[in-house]
Amino acid sequence: MNGAQAMVRTLADAGVGVWFANPGTSELHLVAALDGEPRARGVLCLFEGVATGAADGYGRMAPDPAAVLLHLGPGLGNGLANLHNARRGGTPVVTVIGDHATGHQRFDAPLQSDIAAVAGSVSAWTGRPVTAAEAGKAAAEAVAAARAGGVATLIVPADAAWSDGGEVAAALPAPPPEPVADAALEPAAAALTGGEPCVVLIGGGATRREGLEAAGRIAAATGARVLCETFPARLERGAGLPAVERLAYLGEMAAAQLDGARHIVLAGARRPVTFFAYPGLPGDLVPDGCQVHDLGADATGALTGLAGMVAKDAAPALQVAARPEIPTGALTGETAAAVIGALLPEGAIVSDEANTSGLWLPGATAGAPPHDWLSLTGGAIGQGLPVATGAAVACPDRPVVCLEADGSAMYTISALWTQAREGLDVTTVVFNNGSYAILSMETTRVGAVPAPPEAGTITRDMVDLSRPALDFVALASGMGVPASRARTAEELAAQFGKALAEPGPHLIEAVVPPLG
Amino acid sequence: MNGAQAMVRTLADAGVGVWFANPGTSELHLVAALDGEPRARGVLCLFEGVATGAADGYGRMAPDPAAVLLHLGPGLGNGLANLHNARRGGTPVVTVIGDHATGHQRFDAPLQSDIAAVAGSVSAWTGRPVTAAEAGKAAAEAVAAARAGGVATLIVPADAAWSDGGEVAAALPAPPPEPVADAALEPAAAALTGGEPCVVLIGGGATRREGLEAAGRIAAATGARVLCETFPARLERGAGLPAVERLAYLGEMAAAQLDGARHIVLAGARRPVTFFAYPGLPGDLVPDGCQVHDLGADATGALTGLAGMVAKDAAPALQVAARPEIPTGALTGETAAAVIGALLPEGAIVSDEANTSGLWLPGATAGAPPHDWLSLTGGAIGQGLPVATGAAVACPDRPVVCLEADGSAMYTISALWTQAREGLDVTTVVFNNGSYAILSMETTRVGAVPAPPEAGTITRDMVDLSRPALDFVALASGMGVPASRARTAEELAAQFGKALAEPGPHLIEAVVPPLG
């Protein structure tokens, strides 16, 4: 058995069988090894950013991580932005990067670069097996590291893959989270019951049903306000689940949400800060004099323990089932959101990269049947289509809805091809407003210049996507995805309903005004 | 004047006025500063890999480097592969990456990552001005570093850009290359006149007319064989120029070219090695017992000096004008090359990422009117369309021809949108063979498995682009580029001729068989 075979079998034994891949010559023995492993599935992506984003989407939804196969340093570079998002979301991903054979590295051949330096910027763990004998063990360690929450990267020299002497390694148990001692929760419990205004800010694993219910009980018993981090990796929501408001993206709105809080209890979320810096404005969103209590790594366990201490008999307030009416007339971000809220199917997985056009989505979908909401964890755009792709591979029996901004869509548009190739049930709505609307808005917020249209020519150019207009119907058709264009709310409703009713991928270009 | 204004003006003073850009919030003061600088031009790209590749293409063709504006670490990641290619080609590029404001970095906001670690993998020089006062000086240093041949990277915190106190710095003179002393050339001269078989391997700056003529004189006088590195950044060629054969991509063919050589004189080229490692095959292509003589950094100067020593009165053999007949019938890599050779206009800039479909291009175009050939310097695919875009910005009066493989095209396909937006005169021919044909070929060469179609299902899948078929006519149309499809040699000839005759971008999808 060669090193590649040992690695592929070790990964399969550890539950990692799905490979999102864009291989090159130095990975071909790994590809061949996939053919020898009945539990392995190869999903070809036409660009590495699609592969890494798909692995992120898969890892958010599946019980096991996916592997992503990349070609040398440039392949890693192409996939880096979505690995950044996975890192920020704590998504388990096993990255496998082929390297030149060990004896070849001294030649500094054209494709050589410092893979480890780049990998280090996104990886919680990096392994570099040098021989076939080390390949299996490194693979087992990688899976354990990924399951602890993050990107685990294997850099595999071609000769470690092709040489004999590979040994399958047993899957390593993921260390269970440290049990949370009641004593550690006491400061937070005291804060919650002390009568001062409290916010419970949830994130990470605490945005699933169990954590939400515990947080909801705490809120019901103590009057604490529960907020969710701005960009949760996977938020369970909808009718019958405890509703939770997300911390706003805009610092001034987030500050208003936190205003007056004397205690912030962090449950899986990071200390709240603004997304960007703005001249003269604070980046730290914690109000003056407010104490912060961090519940640690096992946020769901801690919240459950805390609920037992302060909210024994309380029940969480649950979201009432409610959908908007299907609107008529002009298509705007608001009416589009109403259409989606009206029709979102039960069990949907929503990949949300709608950015400014998505402002009305949370409200319009809050009372829809239960669904999962996957958001832009690390802020690196180009995530939406790939994450939808990976989520659809992870959950073939659930409808996936991808809500995508025009500018962001163009980063990883070839995800549509993989959706067509794999017959994935993804309905993508691209909000085409012909601009980087968020940048247009940020232009004045950072105090750079007046916002377009008053700004200078270059500034206006840099936020303009209308010259020429992007035709997403043509783009999707070119990659085998049936597509249509909606210019009114009625058209969107008809097309969205039809797309949801048919299996396989569909794309709808929703023509909307900027920030409208 | 703020730091951004000082930086932009310093760059303009140093000759850097073209900015290929995909900015975000942290770069908006730099964008605003472009509006205040009459010599600045902003070229929006929808993906950072397009921006970096365009800066590479610009830097290969223009007397001055371009700047490329990227958004934080993920933006750099997206642009990394084409910066790798620029690094490998020694192309001057000034990379400007916005970072969070210095006071914001301690918050570890969602988009934060280790930019310097990633930048270090591609940069010959990295500067991190921390205050507005340092911004201008750092910019001047960056240009000087880039002009020395490579990627110079400025990481600019938002507050260094937006704060007052910016100071314009004077352009730094690029140090002239060390003059080459005749004494340093004597070993090479002795080798060339010693009667043993010699190869002069040219690369870097020596692939322009001056270096080619010196090498050609040496060959004429001494009988040395002149070869060019496999992937020159910019090779001047065509009728009336000294013809030069390129070192083959496949190791066994390259070894045959070098077989018997007792001396290899490196003039701007690196020691020849195989592109990848193959089990049991040597990676070093220098024959046993062959001596290697490196002429140093100023390859053109050294070659000229060497020609003065060993080839005083010799004249180089010049390529005779000759074009293929326009073929008829089936469209293959071979007949497509003949069409292109028959019609390639004088002064054309060819961006070549045709990969396996391009096998016949060098032969078919050798006797075409003088033109420049830009190739895949670092082997990171996704270069062709962006490099063509940047070359067209650099040389608006010259026709640009982009010869592109289907798989590689999909990495940075949105370059077409920038071509349409800027009205660039680029004629792209996408060779659609429905496969990663080079990987299919490499599968057996590395000894992984039998080549497709005998290979296993996953291996076959990983090289297959036919399911679904990519429709490049639809893709181009979706980005505002007029497009057509050619299925016969006659169709390609008609469409290629028409595209060349019309200004602005065009795309032709040339449907060809894999490796045919």
Image: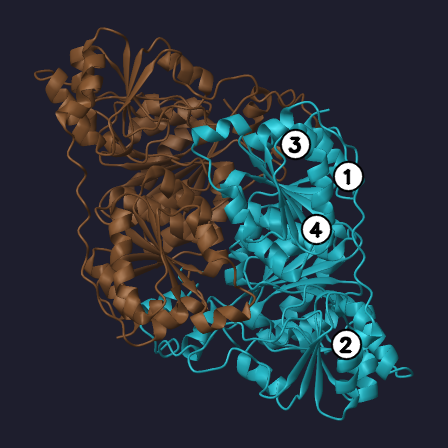
Chain colours: A brown, B cyan
How far is the residue under mark 3 from the one under mark 1? 14 Å
Looking at this view, name the residue that lies furthest to the front. Answer: B183
Residue drawn at (75%, 81%) of the image: B188
Secondary element under disc 3, as helix, strand or loop, is helix
Residue drawn at (36%, 43%) of the image: A387
Q: Would you name the residue on which mark 1 appears?
A: B12
Q: Would you name the residue on which mark 4 appears?
A: B146
Residue A472: x %, y % from top left: 49, 43
Badge 4 or badge 1: first in the primary sequence: 1
Residue B136: x %, y % from top left: 72, 35
**Residue type marked 4:** Ala
Q: Is B286 located above or below residue A433 in the figure? A: below
Q: Would you name the residue on which mark 3 appears?
A: B31
Q: Is A71 located above or below residue B103 in the figure? A: below
Badge 3 or badge 4: first in the primary sequence: 3
How far is the residue under mark 4 from the one under mark 2? 34 Å
